Image (tube, grey):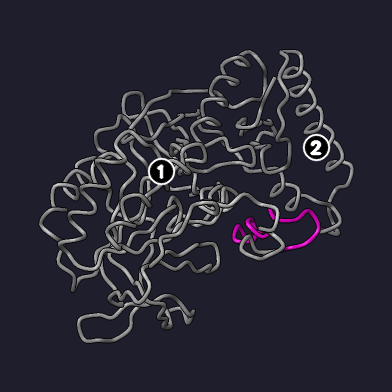
């Protein structure tokens, strides 16, 4: 399934719907809905956002904006502090309308370039940008939230900055899609890039006060790790999955990366929680046959990693398609039957042994069953395993 459908599946068990629709939010809890509005301010609902601005205020069409991230359990407190700061100073801002939208914005398959953004603050010029970033960072010191991959982090708190559009303008991307736009140095509308990595348009000068923060961001390098990453297998909002090699032992491994407070599941558990759960369970099941094995655990750059022994083979869903006898008229059906029963036997033995240890696997499907060239089966992905 296309991961972009994920948020539309979460609204209703029977029908696709948008989180921002009236039906999806009618019974939801909203942020700041009971807060009195200043007399000279106005509010506007737009998609997932509630926009707050002084009446008659103006903003440039584009510029530096400040994003503030938050967790589900501190979002109301973070928002109250931002509002208490911005309203007396007449600084416009917007925020996600409710907890469900915040959860989906930070879910495992949320768009990585937009994940983490809870509040957006719109300074009117560079002087206000510098002062606002500094004072919000001080006010929010100690608060935690997911790292906003598209932005430059200010210090080590939940404040981030990015140059982009304020006004709703659009253009065509090189792939022919309608995307948000900003003006380049010639006044031409170009895509307002929201990649999962900080990007500064080549015609924009980085403000001097941000130089130390950019240097801090660039200081971390994977060359410091005792692992050499050889291939990216997959990215999600919770982190990456990589083929790598332990340079100390020349052992092939798979590295699972977990981003704190990101990659939330339906219960609100983040990627780090699930990674630690997987490591704990696999160590408890170390004597069970047909399971992936833990090689190492470590932290780097604020993210946590689990190194698993590399499993030779392919997912069962791929192998079945290749071997299925009704796809190949000349196939040996008896041979396929023997193979299928042997795969089933190995999986059943593994699951029975897992249960004997008091653990429920919880994620048994053909994508998580690896089959080697010799027919040996290995079960992977124990993030949702539980007593």
Q: Point out the stretch of residues depicted in magenta.
A: 1-16
Q: Secondary structure under badge 1?
A: helix
Residue 146 percent location from the top left of the image = 42, 43
| SS type, badge 2 | helix
Depth check: give the residue in front, 175 or 66. 66
Side of 268 where 160 appears, left or right: left
- Give the mark, 2 or 1, whose residue is nearer the N terminus: 1
Which residue lies under the disc numbered 2? 339
Q: Residue at x 42, y 61 (%)?
A: 94
Seen at 63% across and 57% down, the residue is 7
In depth, the one of 232 and 171 nearer the eye is 171
Vertical arrangement, residue 39 with respect to residue 148, above or below? below
Quick one: label 2, few (<14), some, or many (20+) residues within 10 Å?
some
At a point 29% along the width and 60% down the height, the residue shown is 162
- The residue sitting at 27% across, 65% down in the picture is 163
Badge 1 is on which residue?
78
Tag 1: Cα neighbours inside 10 Å, few (<14), some, or many (≥20)? Answer: many
Which of discs 2 and 1 lies nearer the camera? The answer is 1
Give the quarter of the figure containing the N terminus: bottom right
Q: Find out whether residue 11 is within the magenta segment.
A: yes
Position of residue 195 in the picture relative to residue 335 (left or right): left
Depth check, front residue: 161 or 149: 161
Q: Position of residue 283 (x, y in %)?
A: 56, 16
């Amino acid at each position: 399934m296309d991961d972009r459908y994920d948020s539309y599946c979460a609204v209703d068990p029977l029908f696709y719907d948008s989180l921002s629709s009236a039906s999806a939010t009618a019974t939801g809890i909203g942020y700041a809905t009971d807060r009195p509005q200043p007399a000279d301010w106005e509010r506007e609902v737009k998609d997932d956002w509630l926009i707050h601005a002084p009446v008659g205020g103006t903003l440039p069409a584009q510029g530096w904006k400040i994003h503030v991230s938050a967790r589900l359990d501190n979002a109301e407190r973070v928002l109250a502090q931002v509002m208490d700061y911005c309203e007396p100073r007449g600084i416009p801002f917007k925020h996600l309308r409710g907890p469900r939208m915040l959860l989906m914005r930070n879910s495992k398959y949320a768009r990585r370039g937009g994940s983490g953004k809870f509040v957006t603050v719109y300074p009117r010029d560079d002087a206000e940008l510098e002062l606002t970033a500094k004072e919000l960072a001080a006010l929010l010191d100690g608060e935690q939230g997911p790292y906003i991959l598209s932005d430059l982090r200010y210090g080590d708190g939940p404040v981030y900055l990015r140059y982009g559009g304020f006004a709703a303008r659009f253009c065509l991307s090189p792939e022919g899609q309608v995307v948000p736009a900003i003006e380049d140095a010639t006044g031409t509308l170009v895509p307002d890039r929201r990649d999962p990595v900080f990007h500064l348009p080549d015609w924009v000068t980085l403000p001097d006060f941000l130089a130390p923060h950019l240097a801090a961001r660039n200081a971390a390098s994977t060359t410091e790790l005792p692992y050499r990453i050889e291939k990216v297998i997959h990215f999600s909002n919770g982190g990456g999955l990589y083929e790598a090699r332990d340079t100390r032992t020349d052992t092939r491994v798979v590295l699972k990366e977990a981003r704190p407070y990101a990659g939330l599941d339906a219960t609100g558990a983040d990627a780090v929680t699930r990674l630690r759960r997987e490591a704990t369970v696999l160590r408890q099941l170390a004597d069970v046959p047909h399971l992936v094995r833990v090689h190492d655990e470590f932290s780097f750059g604020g993210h946590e990693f689990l190194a698993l022994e590399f499993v030779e083979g392919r997912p069962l869903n791929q192998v079945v398609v290749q071997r299925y006898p009704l796809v190949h008229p000349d196939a040996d059906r008896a041979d396929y039957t023997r193979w299928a029963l042997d795969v089933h036997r190995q999986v059943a033995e593994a699951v029975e042994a897992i249960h004997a240890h008091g653990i429920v696997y919880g994620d048994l499907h053909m994508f998580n069953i690896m089959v080697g060239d010799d027919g040996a089966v290995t079960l992977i992905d124990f993030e949702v395993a539980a007593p």
